[in-house]
Image (spheres, rainbow, N blue to C red):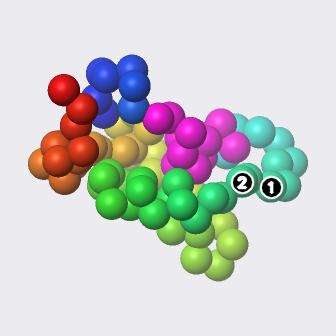
Amino acid sequence: MSSDRRLPLRRPRLHAHVAAATPNLRHLEWFHDQVRIETLFFDGTLDPQGGTITPDSSAPGNGLDLRSSDVEQFRVR
């Protein structure tokens, strides 16, 4: 993922590992607008089909891979 600290990190995918490690977790906020942006710019996003998400334990880090070419047009210089 980008080392640019201005990149918003409030995404459902980033909470998945913490949620998986929390006993008796009942709810995870899932905002459609954030998920829409996440799926446009990252590979490795989760799909809550069926009401559950499961982090990919074989993927390094948080499992997200920034598609640099897709976000370049939005870069502020």
Compared to residue 68, the image places residue 3 above or below, namely above
Tell me whether the residue at label 2 lies in contact with that at label 1, contact meaning CB atoms closer than 8 angstroms.
yes
> Left or right: where does residue 34 sit relative to residue 5?
right
Q: Position of residue 71 (x, y in %)?
A: 23, 47
Q: Secondary structure at mark 2?
A: loop
Nearer the observer, 12 or 23: 12
- Label 2 sits on residue: 29
Q: Amino acid at mark 1?
A: His
> What secondary structure do most residues of the magenta stretch adopt?
helix
Q: Quadrant of the C terminus?
A: top left
At x 30%, y 21%, the residue is: 3
Q: Amino acid at mark 2?
A: Glu
Q: Quadrant of the N terminus?
A: top left
As for residue 12 lying within the magenta part, the answer is yes
Q: Secondary structure at mark 1?
A: loop
From which residue to which does the magenta span run? 8-19
The label shown at residue 27 is 1
> Left or right: where does residue 27 sit relative to residue 55?
right
As for residue 32 lying within the magenta part, the answer is no
